[in-house]
Amino acid sequence: MTDLAQLYQVIDHTWPAAKIWTETGWTLRDGQGGGKRVSAATMAEPNADIGQAEAAMHAMDQRPIFMIRDGDDTLDTELAARGYDIVDPVNVYIAPVGKLTDVPMPRVTAFQIWEPLAIMTEIWAKGGVGPERINVMHRAATKTAILTRSLERDARWRRLCRAA
């Protein structure tokens, strides 16, 4: 899959907002404290009024934040003129899974698990991932976590989700 529209849908399904809807030319997201991506507004119609998106986000007690997508150059310029800064730029890399590594995984070094275990939430908490973000994980349609081991100790947890 390399179509950007599909990738944007994958983003919304793998790290989902509590509610997502479109009004006044904007796709709005109620993130319920789960982070910037689940709270960001995206432009649904050209020349949509930025002030209306800001008002909608304020009404949800969210700090106004916008996700700039491919082709949103004018919006990017308008937001900069209003004093918005670029925060957390994202690059999308696409590759077949088989191209990720040619190193075979030793037996008993990775475990696919879901629901979160206590150690998992402890590790996430140490990394700044609190209950609001864990709620985002629970909202994903399909999910798993991978526990990897190194030198007979828990190495790290990774949360993986895919759209249903």
Image (cartoon, rainbow, N blue to C red):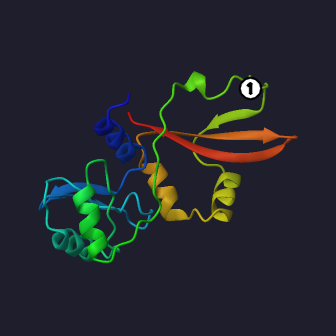
Q: Quadrant of residue 25?
A: bottom left
- Residue 1, given in percent of the width and then of the height, sits at 38, 28
Q: Residue at x 37, y 30 (%)?
A: 2
Picture residue at 63% right of the left edge, 58% below the top: 124
Of 112 and 48, the residue lying toward us:
48
Res. 121 image quadrant: bottom right
Q: Position of residue 47 (x, y in %)?
A: 13, 60
**Residue at x 37%, y 62% (from the top left corner):** 31
* Up-down relation of residue 161 to residue 62 (above or below): above
Residue at which label 1 appears: 105
Name the foreground residue: 116 vs 105: 105
Left or right: residue 77 versus residue 12 is: left
Give the residue at x 55% y 26%: 97
Q: Is residue 163 above or below residue 20?
A: above
Q: Is residue 161 above or below residue 48?
A: above
Residue 157 relative to residue 48: left or right: right
Q: From the top left corner, tell me how far across and down residue 7 is, in percent.
A: 36, 38
Check disc 1 and report its element: helix, strand or loop: loop
Q: Give the residue type that dot 1 points to.
A: Met
Q: Position of residue 153 (x, y in %)?
A: 83, 45
For disc 1, the neighbor class at 10 Å (few under 14, some 14 to 19, many from 20) is: few
